[in-house]
Image (cartoon, rainbow, N blue to C red):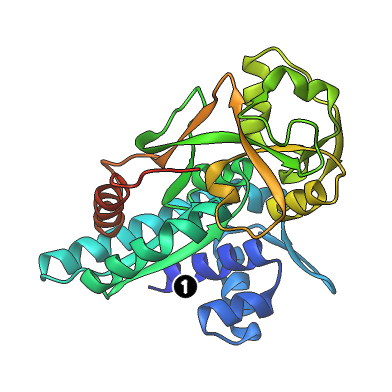
Amino acid sequence: MLESARCKAFLTSAETGSFSKAAEILGYTPSGVSQLVTAFESDLGFALLLRSKRGVAPTADGERMLPAVRDFIAHEGRMYQIAAEIKGLSVGEVTIATYPSISTHWLPGVIQGFREEYPRIKIKLMEGIRQEIVQWLEEKRADVAFLSRKEPMSYDWIPLAEDEMLAVLPKTHPLATAESYPLRNCHEESFIMPALGRDADVAALFERNGLELNVQFTTLQNFAAISMVEQGLGISIMNELITRNWQCDVVKLPLEPPQKIVLGMALLSRENASPAVKRFVKYAAARLSRIETRR
């Protein structure tokens, strides 16, 4: 248990950049977290964290230790979950990495239903863009990722639904009353790219079709991009789930030719997942397989 506490103190401090923030998460005092990390460093024989007035950060040796520490904590968690299963209890924690659109439209109902069946299993959400979600999954900071499929897919993959890609246009656009938007026209437009210009689905769409974008604006949030479209600053392309229920005065048109993405769940290994994660994946897959995307 002492080794576990030291590992958690180091990992949480490294991820939050602060003994104080780590203490809030772990339920210790900042000095208690600092003492645990110092004891861990003493046992190992080298420094794990750099201390400064601004906080803490992993040393080079600390960075090398992080994957092993994450594995240790994950294996310990699985051990206790299996022991609980043997005693007839369903306990544990599931950390989910997801797009904000999925956490808004899909996951509230899933989590509510899951918690009703498994009230002792805790759920933690992490929202980000695709690159962040993949990183969290590979670093084992997340157990399950909800994201779009992109080849090569090196994870265990559970497809859930196809989602149509739409052109988002200002109402003053010449094609605002058309039935569809020609994809080939995009290179002539002032384009607004979400995800700080790194929207993987949009980038892949244009790469597949051999087109280049004239990106004039980048935003972090999709809603900001839609608001800029509403003001006539350009156009954007998003999957339907992102645009659903947003009250902006814009036009959404299907692309010509039609374009879709596949949304689903990814795990590093479904076979080696903890009992709590396996229960969540099974429940979510059954519930979300009935979803129909719409425009």
Q: Is residue 30 above or below residue 282?
A: below
Q: Residue at x 70, y 62 (%)?
A: 49
Give the residue pinned by disc 1: 5
Q: Residue at x 42, y 43 (%)?
A: 293
Camera-nearest residue between 164 and 40:
164
Q: Residue at x 62, y 16 (%)?
A: 208
Camera-nearest residue between 16 and 39:
16
Q: Residue 99, percent across and down?
A: 55, 50
Q: Is residue 82 above or below residue 194?
A: below
Q: Residue 62, percent across and down?
A: 64, 53
Decide if residue 187 is on the left or right side of residue 241: right
Label 1 crowd (10 A; few <14 / some 14-19 / many >=20): some
The quarter of the displayed image where residue 18 is located = bottom right
Residue lying furthest bottom in this view? 29
Q: Quadrant of the N terminus?
A: bottom left
The quarter of the displayed image where residue 176 is located = top right
The amino acid at mark 1 is Ala
